[in-house]
Image (cartoon, coloured by chain):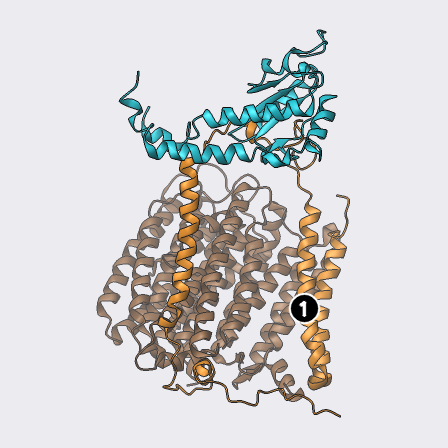
Amino acid sequence: MPKPLPLAPASPVPKGVDCGLSKAHGVLSGQCDMTGMEFLPVLFMVAGIVLVAVATLFVSSLLRPSNPYPAKNMPYECGMDPAGEAAGGRFRVQFFILAILFVIFDVETMFLFPWAVVLKEIGLVGYVEMFVFMLLLLVGFAYAWLKGALEWEV
Amino acid sequence: MTAEALLQSILASLPEIVVVAGACVLLILGQFVRKGQEHFLVWASVAIVLIAALGTLMLLGEVRPAYTGMFIADGFAAFFKVLFYLATGLTFLLSPKYVEIEEIGSSEYYVLLLFALSGMMIMASATDLLSIYVGLELMALCTYVLTGFLRQQRRSNEAALKYVILGAASTGIFLYGVSLVYGLTGTTQLDGMAAAMTGDPLDPGLLLAVVFIVAGLVFKVGAVPFHMWVPDVYEGAPTTITAFMSVGPKAAGFAVILRVFLNPLVAASDAWIIVAVIAVVTMALGSFVALVQDNFKRLLAYSSIAHAGFAMFGVVAGGADGIASVMLYLLIYAFMNLGIFGTVIMMRNGDFSGEVIEGYAGFAKSHRGLALLMLLYLFSLAGIPPTAGFFAKFYVLVALVERGFVILAVIAVLLSAVAAYFYIRIVMVIYMREPEGAFDPALTPSVRATLALTAAGTIGIGLFPAWFLGLAQHSVFGD
Amino acid sequence: MGGVNNAIRDSVLFTTADNVINWGRRSALWPETFGIACCAIEMISAGCSRYDLDRFGVVFRPSPRQSDVMIIAGTITRKFAPVVRRLYDQMPEPRWVIAMGTCAISGGVYNTYAVVQGAETFVPVDVHVPGCPPRPEALMHGFLLLQEKIKKSRALAGTALDRVAGP
C-alpha cells in the first residue's frame, strides 16, 4: 500500500510569505518584508491598461463620424416597430422573485457542502446546528409559498 | 464547539433566540389571521418582547461570553437591550390605530419590527466585527422595508429608496474597514483590534481602517457628514416607524461605537479629535437647519441629528463618566422622543395628517392634558429642568468638563440654546394661537398607555437622575 | 476658392489619414444581406465559391448595426419601403447603398401602383448595378466602383477632428 500524501508541506514556508500568519499569532516579526513598494509593478500595469484604453477610445472619438437621430436609435426588430412585452416596458416580476429565492437557497446549498465534509468531526452537535439553520430557511420558504411568490401566472 | 459550550452560548443568547423564533412563528401565523383579528398580532408581538425582556433580566448578574468570543451577554448589553425592548414595545403599542388608518397593518409590519429588534440586540452584544455586521444588516434591512411600507405614497417609496442606497454604501464602507482590519491584524475580534491600535508607532493603515468602520457606524446614528438621509427618511416613513428608527437604530449604533471606544487603550489614542469635530458639526447642523422647518417630522429628524451630536460629545469625553452619560442620554432620549412621536401619531386621524406644525395651533384650548404632555416632551427635548432632558445634557457636560474639554462644553451649551428655539416655538404655537378647527386625536387605550409611560419616564428620570446614572455606570463597569 | 482655408485640410497629416482610413473602409465592406426578390439569388451566387466576394473583404452580416453597405436587391413595393428606410436608418455611419437590379434602380418593368419607382426616391444610392438580374460579375463590378468612390472621398468629413480643423 503506498503511503498517503501528507496534508502539510514537508519543506518550511519561505519567510516573505509568512508575514500575515506571524502577525495573526500575535508575534510582530521584524523579518516581514512585504512592503507597499513591492506592489509598484502592479500599479504600473493598472495605470498602463487604463491609459491604453482611454487613449484608444479618445482617438477613436476624434476620428469617427457621430450622427445619432431617433430612427437610428430605435431597437432593431427587422425594420418593424418594436412590439411585445419587453418593448412595452413591462417586466414580469416573477423573474425577479424567482431569482432572489434562487440566490437564497443557492447560498444555503453552498453552506451545506463544507458542513458535509466536516460532519464526522463536528458530530451530533454540528448535525443539529445545521438543521436549525435549515429550519430557519424553511420558515422563509413556507412564507414565500403561502404568500404566492411561487405562482408563475400573475 | 463542544456541546456544553454550545449550551452556554444558547443560554447567553436566549433573548435573541426567543425574539427570532417568535418572529418566525408570527410570520407563518400571520398568514392565517383573518381581517378583523389584527389585534392578535399586536399582543403577540408585545408578548414576545416581554418574554425576551424577562430573559434578559434573568440573565443579569454574570458576564457570559458566547459563541467563541463573538457574542457577550454583559451589563452593558443588557442596558441597551432594555432600551431596545422599550422602543420596540412602545412602537407596538402606538401602532394599532395608526396602521388601521394608514392601512398598513399586515403581519409583516410586526414581524419586521421584531427582526429589527433582534438585529439591534445582536449589535449590542457583539464583540466581533463580523457579528456587529450581521446585527447591523439585520436591523438595517428590516428598517429599509419598514420605511417604504406606505406603498401608495410616493414620499415613502422615495424615502425607502434613498435609505437603501445610502445604507448599502455605508455598509460597504464599514465592511471595507473590517477587511482592512483583518488584513492588518489577522483578527476581527474587537479586542484584537484594540490591541493593535496601541502598537507603537500607530500603523496609518489601521487608523484608516478604523476611520472607515466609524464612518459606516456614524451613518446609522445620523451624524454629519452622513446625515443626508435622515430628514427625507424620517419624513417619508410611517410615523410609528420614524419613532422606532429615531430611538432604536440610533441607540444600537451608539452601543457599537461605545464598545469600540470602551477599551481604554483606544480611548487614549488621538481618535477623539475626529469624533469631536463630527460632534460639533452634527449638532450645529441639526440645530440650525431645524429652525426653518415647518413639517413636524422633518423638524424632529433634524432635532434627532442634533441630539445625536450631543451624544457624540459624551463619546468624546470617554472614560467611565462619558460612557455612562451617553447611555443615560440615550435612555432619556428614548422616552422623550417616543413621547413626542406618540403625540404626532395620535394627531393622525381622518384627514388631519398631524405633520404640519401650524396645524397644531391652539391645541391647548381644547385638549389641556394632551397639550401639557406635548409641553413636557418639548421642554425635555430642549433641556429645561426639572425634566429628564436637562439631566441628560447635564451629565454629558459634566463628563466633558471633568476630562478637560471645556471649550467643547461651551460650544455644546451654545448650540443647545439655539436648538431650544424651535422646541419653544412649537409650544408657543400650541398655547398661544387661535385654533383653526376642531381637533380629533385618535386616543386609543394603548396610545394612552404609551404616553403615560413616556411621561412617567421623562419626569421620573428627571426627579431621580442620580439613580439612573448609577445604573448606567454599574452596568458598564460592574461597579 | 479656398486655397488658404484648405491649408490644414490638405496637409500631409489629413491626407495620409484619409488614405489610410479609406483603405481600411473599402477593403472591408460588410454588406447587410437584404435580398428582397430575384436579384437576391444572383447576390447569393456572387457570394458563393465561383464568384467569390469574400476576397474583396465582403462579409455578409445579418444585422444593419454591423454593416457598412446595404445592397437593395429586388423590387421594392410600397408596403415594404418603410422597412427598407428603417433598416437604412439603423446602419451606423459611414454607410453606402448599392441599388442592384433595374427594379431597385427605377422600378424596372413594374410601372404599377404598388411598386416604388426606384430606391433613390427614399434612400441616397451610391452605385447602380443594372441588369434583370445582373450577373454576379456585374455585382462585383459594382463593388469595385464603390471602392473607387470611397477611395476618392474624404474620410474625416463630419468628425470631431474635421470640425476642429476649421470650416
Q: Colour of chain C?
A: cyan
- Chain that appears brown: B
B437 or C27: nearer the viewer: C27
Does residue C102 appear in the picture of this structure? yes
Total numbered badges shown on the rendered structure = 1
Query: From what the image shows, is residue C29 above or below residue A41?
Result: above
User: Within the image, what quadrant is residue C129 found in?
Assistant: top right
Q: Is residue B52 left or right of residue B264?
A: right
Query: From what the image shows, is residue A4 above or below residue C39?
Result: below
- Chain that appears orange: A
Does residue B222 appear in the picture of this structure? no
Of the residues shown, which amino acid type is indicated by label 1?
Answer: Met
Residue B27 position in % (x across, y down): 70, 61
Crowding at dot 1, Cα within 10 Å, few <14 / some 14-19 / many 20+, comes out as: few
Q: Is residue B157 left or right of residue B383?
A: right
| Quarter of the picture holding the C terminus of chain B | bottom left
User: Within the image, what quadrant is residue B24 found in?
Assistant: bottom right
| Quarter of the picture holding the N terminus of chain B | bottom right
C7 or B222: nearer the viewer: C7
Residue C161 position in % (x across, y down): 37, 33
Chain for mark 1? A
Residue under label 1: A110
B166 or B180: nearer the viewer: B180
